[in-house]
Image (tube, rainbow, N blue to C red):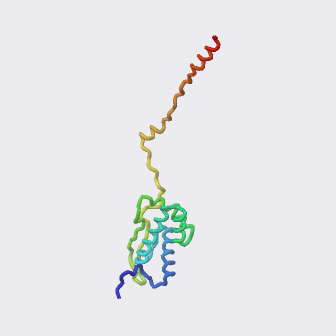
Amino acid sequence: MHRHGYKGRKFGRETDQRRALIKGLAESLVRDESIKTTLPKAKELVPYIEKLITKAKKGDLHSRRQVISGLQTIESAHKLVDDLAPKMGGRTSGHVRIEKLENRRGDNAEIAKVTFVDDLKEAPVAKPVKKAEAKTEAKPVVAKKAAVKKPAVKKAAAAKETK
């Protein structure tokens, strides 16, 4: 029997347990911004969290609700949508990195560290304003008042008085 068309790893779990595992890993990654897990679990987590980040970057109500359903707690979903996703606006994909670590001592399992590629601790920095632009913005434009001329009205009134 061949393995064509079988997508994903089973991890020796039932479907609902497997979904809960991935959901919990995504939750921990959003909350702690870095987790250590086994390499196969990390490889399954990356596409799942990438899709959630893409939805969080969109930021509308429907996307926010989809992110809430993809994570275990509402607080972490709001953190992803409001805090983390705006800081990742510069990239379209590849938000998460897997770094291989040493093997676990007990069972020799490959351990990996999953982190966000962008440094999320720093606040987003606004672009500095150039000096030339700052000088032009600093000078307010003063409009000159135009003199109101009504000579035709005065001449007509003066012509009536003389008659």
- Looking at this view, is 37 or 25 the one in front? 25
Kindly give the residue lying farthest to the front in the view shown.
163
Screen quadrant of the C terminus:
top right
Q: Residue furthest left?
A: 2
> In which quadrant of the rendered view does residue 44 lie?
bottom left
Of the 4 image quadrants, the one containing the N terminus is bottom left
Q: Residue at x 55, y 63 (%)?
A: 61
14 relative to 57, above or below: below
Q: Can you give x and y, in whole percent of width and height, for residue 66 in the image? A: 52, 68
- 44 relative position to 72: left or right: left
User: Residue 97 falls in which quadrant of the image?
Assistant: bottom left
**Residue 154 location, x and y as percent?**
60, 18
Say which of 157 and 49 sits in front: 157
Residue at the outermost top position? 162
> Is 129 or 121 nearer to us in this picture?
129
State the image coordinates of residue 17 (x, y, percent, origin top left).
51, 81
| Residue 156 in the figure: left or right of residue 43 | right
Image location (x, y in percent) of residue 86: 48, 59
Up the image or down, 123 lies above or below 14; here it is above
Whether residue 65 sits left or right of residue 7 in the image: it is right
Tell me if 90 is positioned left or right of 17 in this view. left
Asked if residue 91 is positioned above or below residue 139 in the image, the reply reads below
Residue at left offset 48%, top offset 74%: 25
Name the residue at 54% across, 27% down: 145
Q: How many marks?
A: 0
Q: Nearer the viewer, residue 140 or 7?
A: 7
